[in-house]
Amino acid sequence: MRTQVAIIGAGPAGLTLGRLLECAGIDAVILERRSAGHVLSRIRAGVLEQGSADLLERIGVGGRMRREGIPHDGVELSFDGDMLRIDFHGLIGRKVMIYGQTEVTRDLMDARNASGARTIYEAEDVSLHDVRGGAPRVRFVKDGGLHEITCDFIAGCDGFHGITRASVPDKAIRTFERVYPFGWLGVLVDKPPVADELIYAHHERGFALCSMRSHTRSRYYVQVDAGETVDAWPDERFWDELRRRLNPEIAERLQTGPSIEKSIAPLRSFVAEPLRFGRLFLAGDAAHIVPPTGAKGLNMALRDVGILAEALVEHYEAKSDAGIDAYSQRVLAHTWKTERFSWWMTSLLHTFPETGRFGRRIQRAEFDYLASSRSAQESLAENYTGLPDA
Ligand code: RFL
Ligand code: PHB
């Protein structure tokens, strides 16, 4: 089999890159380890930056998002029950869009099915060969048979635990990592959201987040210690803990019900440098991870592949490798700013075992400063709604 770009991974990064290339007339094959159903069953992000929503529109997959997504003008922060609204629209004239990653993925999959572009699901044992040479190859096993794709470029869009970053020799890559001593326990429930906007809450018992997927489906999270298991959290325990961390009037309004999904995500900050190795590029979670507090992971993935697609189009159409040569540096410049914001939101809103009473007073001072400073609020708004490209 031959293609121009072999894309490893059919998450948001891989599917969006596939669509961008298809729109530019560049042939690509996507290899995904899991089934399409499995990819769609993962409940993850819920917030799209304006730039992400615009990108999805531009590649012709924005129709359902426009109809079913919910634009939000701001978010609420809560500190020990004291509420502070950050009015993105009033402060800087920007918004975000509430539209689940599952829906983004479904729309991209539908578009790909309709156009007949090739995606090979349940591709096992994917391996990369001759990445530094002129004609890289990708091997994989499907239905027990060994297959090979020859290509011009490989896009590593296979997430944090994928094989593309792992295929790079240790001496060619540097990684930067911070693992947090807690995770997020998330619950999905078919009940209307407790408030019109997202609520990010700090409480001495830990962080909590009230989010949503629609006007009838809500997504809630509470901070739990690393190593906790879902089995230890029957629904009633989850709802009790969530209520305790919210402002009492909001807790009163919370509509609870049986969870339709419940999972724990560990929190981590991670960056790999560089992001290009010969003819292999890393994008999305394969390249970097942020804790979900700033709602950035999916948006970073879309931004990365936007930059990569531009570079590949330039290679094929203008016969220039300037974009390819600049890919790593361009993505990393943005990545580190987004890492900083996600780390800062995480530091403000979670409880850290090591910082004690002093640390909590500093967090309170940070919240009070935000409440009193328009420039601090503008900074949050600018970062949350998405920084412009570096
Ligand atoms: P993905 O989504 O992990 O997709 C990678 C795909 O690669 C496949 N794969 C392989 N395929 C072939 N061969 C192999 N060897 C392979 N190994 C892996 C996998 O099966 C998978 O299908 O990475 P991608 O595309 O880079 O997308 C990144 C986003 O999924 C991620 O950043 C976000 O979900 C992060 N995130 C959030 N981001 C936001 O922008 N806003 C949010 O509100 C937000 N909330 C969240 C989040 C992530 C969370 N979790 C569970 C980590 C909330 C949570 C709880
Ligand atoms: C979500 O709805 O899953 C969500 C929203 C905002 C975040 C993280 C997750 O910061």
Image (tube, grey):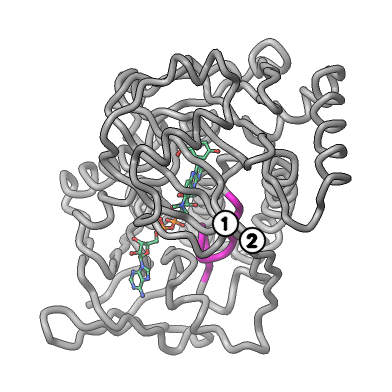
Q: Nearer the viewer, residue 158 or 224?
A: 224
Q: CA distance from mark 2 to mark 1?
A: 6 Å
Tell me which numbered mark, 2 or 1, is placed earlier along the sequence.
2
Q: Which residues are magenta?
A: 281-291
Q: Which amino acid type corresponds to the residue marked 2 in the rendered image? A: Pro
- Queried on whether the Cβ of the residue with tag 2 lies below 8 angstroms from ligand 1, the answer reads no
Q: Residue at x 80, y 19 (%)?
A: 371
Q: Residues within 10 Å of mark 2 (few under 14, many from 20)?
A: some
Residue corresponding to mark 2: 181
On residue 280, which mark appears? none
Disc 1 on helix, strand or loop?
A: strand
Residue corresponding to mark 1: 225
Ligand 1 sits in quadrant: bottom left
130 relative to 246, above or below: below
| Mark in the foreground, 2 or 1 | 1
Say if the magenta span includes residue 165.
no
Q: Residue at x 53, y 34 (%)?
A: 209
Q: Residues within 10 Å of mark 1 (few under 14, many from 20)?
A: some
Q: Residue at x 21, y 65 (%)?
A: 121
373 relative to 112, above or below: above
Looking at the image, residue 24 sits to the left or right of residue 348; the answer is: left
Q: Is residue 147 at all visible to an observer of this figure?
A: yes
CB within 8 Å, label 2 to label 1: yes
Q: Picture coordinates of residue 382 (x, y %)?
A: 71, 29
Residue 75, quarter of the rendered image: top right
Q: Which amino acid type corresponds to the residue marked 1 in the rendered image? A: Asp
Residue at the outermost top position: 90
Say if the magenta span includes residue 287.
yes
Q: Picture coordinates of residue 138 (x, y %)?
A: 34, 81
